[in-house]
Image (spheres, rainbow, N blue to C red):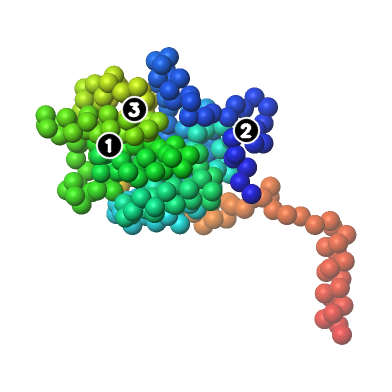
Amino acid sequence: MLTNAPGANLPAGYKKKTIQIFRQKKERGEPIAMLTGYDYPTALALDRAGIDAILVGDSLGMVVLGYENTVPVTMEEMLHHCRAVARGARSAILVGDMPFMSYQASVEQAVRNAGRFLQEGGMHVVKLEGGRERLDAIRAIISAGIPVMGHLGLTPQSIHALGGYHPQGRTTAAARRILEDALLLEEAGCFSIVLESVPARLAELISKRIAIPTIGIGAGAGCDGQVLVVHDMLGLFDRFTPKFVKKYADLHGEMQHAFGEYIEDVAARRYPAQEHMVEMPDEEWQALLMEIASDKDK
Ligand code: KIV
């Protein structure tokens, strides 16, 4: 059973966060901190560090599953990782990222799949990519009682339509379209919008024009909050690192170093040492030796 229902099994001192804090933080001018998370130990660490929200992003397709992009990610893969995160987090708001083709084919399919994120994945809200073309799906999901986070700018599920991972909204027309989409998503009822890889001054303008919080990734400091892919900021994914990422650790390097030391220890018989071994009482050992010896005499 999932134990992540709001308020369930919270240790003393832990306060369950709800999406209301998004709006409250924006009103108070306090930045919202979100990071992606895809597994139980990372969710525990994020939660204990006090993160506001954990996004189980479809970026897991690239940084955890090794796909070329996020297009192949399935609902089943997303739900598998959502459940692991839900088992680890007690306090953070959990955002399930709807994968490619889980909400585009029909409004009914979008609502059903959004529901699966809550019922089977233990998420609290869903995120989906797109602007004006997704309004019907967004409205239907929200009227089913599921809060929706929008996602504008660089929308990686449209990589083939966009022609690559390029910044978006750099011309007057493109910037205007993103601004209009942000207003439409707000009107449709989204509680927040991710702005990915757009000019910082456009993100700041949008953040001032709409009442719901914007969460930026590669969108500058004028957003109401920030999100990063956890494997990027920990230096765990070394295929490429986007320019906007600040690396807080080099875990890939540390892992490789630790694995190398282990291999050397095994080769040199330094591991396992005495303290890593299981012992048995001397008298049991002596009895065993005697039994074996007498077996031989028979
Ligand atoms: O999938 C993801 O991790 C995302 C973030 C980049 C916002 O959508």
State the image coordinates of residue 7 (x, y, percent, origin top left): 62, 33
Mark 3 surroundings: few (<14), some (14-19) or many (≥20) residues within 10 A: many
Structural distance between the alpha carbons of marks 2 and 1: 31 Å
Q: Which mark is residue 7?
A: 2
Identify the residue position indicated by label 1 in the image: 152
Looking at marks 3 and 1 on the same chain, the residue that comes earlier in the sequence is marked by 1
Q: Residue at x 57, y 55 (%)?
A: 269
Image quadrant where one finds the C terminus: bottom right
**Residue lying at 45% horizontally and 57% vertically, measured from the top left:** 76
Task: Indicate which disc, 3 or 2, sits on the residue closer to the N terminus.
Answer: 2
Depth check: give the residue in front, 216 or 138.
Answer: 138
User: Horizontal placement of 149 versus 203: left or right?
Assistant: right
- Give the left or right position of residue 8, taking residue 170 as reference: right
Question: Does the numbered disc 2 mark a residue whose Cβ is under 8 Å from ligand 1?
Answer: no
**Residue in view at x 84 percent, y 75 percent:** 293
Location of residue 206 with respect to 56 vertically, above or below:
above
Q: Residues within 10 Å of mark 2 (few under 14, many from 20)?
A: some
Look at the picture and state if 82 lies above or below 297. Answer: above
**Which of the numbered marks, if any, corresponds to residue 35?**
none
Distance (Cα) linking label 3 and label 1? 10 Å
Q: Residue 288: x percent and y percent?
A: 84, 68
Say the numbered circle drawn on residue 214: 3
Question: Quick check: marks 2 and 1 in contact, CB under 8 Å?
Answer: no
Residue type for callout 3:
Thr
Q: Secondary structure at mark 3?
A: strand
| Mark 1 closeness class: few <14, some 14–19, many ≥20 residues within 10 Å | many
Mark 2 falls on what kind of element? loop
Q: Is residue 239 visible?
A: yes
User: Based on the displayed image, in which of its 4 quarters is residue 224 positioned?
Assistant: top left
